[in-house]
Image (tube, rainbow, N blue to C red):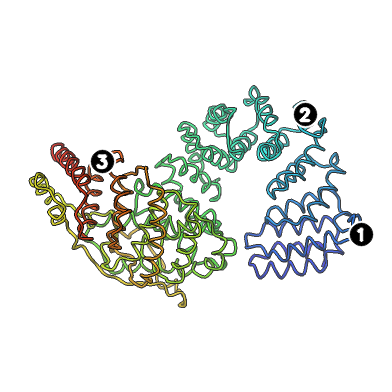
Amino acid sequence: MKLPFLLNSVSRSVSLKEVETVFSKFLKVLPTLDGNTISHCINILSKKEINQPKFLWLKTAEILTDSDNKSNHNSILSRLEVKDVCIILNSFAKVNFLNLKLIETGTSIIIRQIRNIHTRDLCNVIHSLGKLNQHSTLSAVINKLFKPKNNKINNINSVLKVISNCNEKDFSMLLRVLMLNSENLDFDSVTKKLLNSLTDKYDSLSDQTLAILANSVAQYGKDENGTLSVLAPIITLRLRRGNFTPQCIAQISNGFAKLNFRDFELFSALAQRVLMNPQEFPPRCLANLLNGFSKLNIFNEQLFTKLIPQFESNLSLMTPQCIGNTVNAYSKFSSQLNLNLLFSFFNKMILELLNFNTFDSFIGQNYANILSGITKLYTEFLRSHNSQSNYTNETYELCNKMLMALIKKLYVPMLEKFEEFNHLDVLMIFNSMARFRICDNNLIGKLLSKLKLFMQNYKIFELINIVNGCSKFYTTDLKTYFPDSNLNTSLTQSTLNTTINHANKFNTRDLYNTLDLNNTVENNNTVDSTKSVDVAKFELKDVSTISGICNIICTSDVVDKVLILDYYKHFMDHLIKLLRGKSLSYNHIRLVFNSLTTFNMHNKDYNEVLSKVLVDSELDKNEERVIKTFSSVVDYYYGINQKMPNHLEKYILSHLNTCTINCISSNTPIY
């Protein structure tokens, strides 16, 4: 198999099966190939967006390092040119595959020929070694490069001597590598001095170098030199002149967002630059750009709205990460955007996902972002149409089928990679399932098991989301879909006056009698993963005309209640331990009490801790949230047929009088 044919075969392979086939053919002929062909093929294979076949990468490393003697001097790798060795090491780092024999052989070659390596190639190798956590090997390479005394980088002059021969791009790459690995290699001081040496040179640096530098500082994880503060006005000025490529703009947005550096002038300039010519930006760059806005909670309505057509015209070019980032960014600001337009856009992305032939390149974060973002948007869309009467069976069925088809499409590939999901992936997917009560015993069971395994990793507000999610699956009366919607509000304006009039005679049962608990509706849609999805039956012909949907998407009572209750107790026990001596927002307090009401759980320890948390927490300035929270507390105590503790009753009564009178005197609507 000659070079052109082999490279063409490697390049054309897309699916996991195709890659494995061509990979196996490549390994058979590898010993007969020249170094250029070997490095090019391995590099192309490393860039495939699939779940990389690790056993084939292991076989590759074994073939490359196989030798008749311990010195490996007659191995295939030892006979290659150093530039090809660099490419091979970088490729293994891309797929995150560590083979110590390959690393040792490769780095020994690099150290021997370090003066013959282009700076860019060397920077890539250093970065790869850092990515694979090979700190001792990495230290040896860098020390050899700078030739310091005492075999330790402690003299910036030795560094400056090397970089004086670098062009600007090579210098920026080298600086990036030093910043990413400075703490592990104990040359943080050198990195700081290098950054300081740039102080009077920023204005003369190219656009690309500024973008790389901004992103590098973010990867560094700290900005003690105030580099971003200096870069921000320079970049802003150049952006307004129309400078920077799409990739640079994505790097800038990502860099500033990672360090939570909120500069409204800079991000306004980023938006203006993109809107000058959005057609030149590929969807991946746009997704990374908007992700930066989302992370910093900077909303630009014109930018987010005008980029939708650009995304829609390039749906086929969107990678899993691109779709996940886009969905995540737009869902963050769904309440501030035109929901009909956004609903149309999201459904088109769902249809694109339904047409995916393989999900090999999907990772946990992709599944989590997509499911979380779409369910959030649907929640907001349904809430906005909650009070309208123009629902139709057609639009209800459409929304229902879109969501269920997506779950069915993702179901099998998601379970195949489930063990690779991290704690945030699992949490986001669980919350998404709970948000719509999408019930599948197998998947819910796996999610709960993982949540318990990761329990120590979660913050208090995340644990509250978990216990609240458990209550969604346990609900038997199937109350109105949205826990925060108008239809599910316990106290109403008409009953509020009664509460005020009888404030002096307040007791738990009296207030409970004013609550409206009659908003119930039933629907049953469970995930049947054994049935195929016929996309053609609900293809959107004119999705932008959809104006309303039924206020329930999917509720069911099929999840094992004993299982849910058991996990709920585990999560609550841990949450209560963390809450001792703490305070919470009123929204979070309300969610915890609502979950206790759902499970009808009377636990003296829970009650004591939560009562103290409520009394010790700062009173919410939003009177509506205060009343909703107090209502949830009353619901709970009435449900377990227990009298509320006197101190808690007095606390609620005193603040209930104040906030309800303020609401009415200022003509503020309660709901």
| Above or below: residue 431 compared with residue 153 | below
Above or below — where is 241 with respect to 614? above
In this view, the mark in front (2 or 1): 1
Residues marked 1 and 3 touching at CB (< 8 Å): no
Measure how far apart labels 2 and 1 are at the Cα level.
41 Å
In the rendered image, the quadrant that contains the N terminus is bottom right
Q: Quadrant of residue 317?
A: bottom right
Q: Which residue is mark 3?
A: 622
Q: Residues within 10 Å of mark 1 (few under 14, many from 20)?
A: few
Name, please, the residue furthest toward the front: 604
Q: Say the numbered circle drawn on residue 69.
A: 1
Q: Earlier in the sequence, mark 3 or mark 2?
A: 2
- Disc nearer the start of the sequence (1/3): 1
Classify residue 628 as left or right of residue 284. Answer: left
Tell me the element at label 2.
loop
Q: Which amino acid lies under the numbered mark 3 shown in the image of this protein? A: Asn
- The dot on residue 164 is 2
* Residue closest to the eye, 379 or 318: 379
Q: Tag 2: residue type?
A: Ser
Indicate which disc residue 24 carries: none
Task: Using a 10 Å C-alpha cutoff, classify the residue at mark 3 as few (fewer than 14 neighbours), some (14 to 19) or many (20 or more).
Answer: few
Q: Amino acid at mark 1?
A: Asn
Secondary element under disc 3, as helix, strand or loop, is: loop
Question: Residue 380, image x and y in percent?
Answer: 33, 54
**Residue 561: image x %, image y %?**
36, 70
Q: Residues within 10 Å of mark 2 (few under 14, many from 20)?
A: few
Looking at the rendered structure, the secondary structure element under dot 1 is loop
Camera-near label (3 vs 2) is 3
Q: CA distance from mark 1 to mark 3?
A: 76 Å
| Residue at 86%, 53% in the rendered image | 80
